[in-house]
Image (cartoon, rainbow, N blue to C red):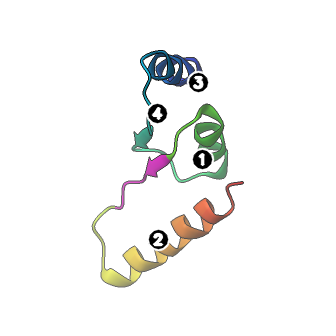
Amino acid sequence: MPGRIEELQRRAGEAGRDRIPVGFSGAKPEPETVEQLTKAGVERIIFYVKPEDAGEVERRLDRYVELMAAVP
């Protein structure tokens, strides 16, 4: 995927366009995955949050926030 994102951005530049934001949906909420995606040029990472009771969903979202805050 890194090569494809680089190509996308190169083509955008050649066409006189600004950088195109790239998102990834369905990523595993793991530090290694987040690091790989951000290094590849992904700017928006979307995690799946399964329907559970509100307290568990909030705890899961808090963990995702902590995970993303650790990204350089």
Mark 4 lies on residue: 18
Please tell me whether residue 24 is drawn above or below residue 12 in the rendered image. below
Q: Residue at (38%, 84%) from the top-left corner? A: 55
For badge 1, the amino acid type reads Val
Horizontal and vertical percent for residue 35? Answer: 66, 44
Figure quadrant of the C terminus: bottom right
Q: Residue at (32%, 82%) from the top-left corner? A: 54
Q: Secondary structure at mark 4?
A: loop
**Of marks 4 and 1, which one's residue comes earlier in the chain?**
4
For badge 3, the amino acid type reads Pro
Q: Residues within 10 Å of mark 2 (few under 14, many from 20)?
A: some
Asked if disc 4 and disc 1 are in contact, CB closer than 8 Å, the reply is no
Horizontal and vertical percent for residue 60? Answer: 47, 70
**Of marks 1 and 3, which one's residue comes earlier in the chain?**
3
Q: Is residue 45 left or right of residue 40?
A: left
Mark 3 lies on residue: 2
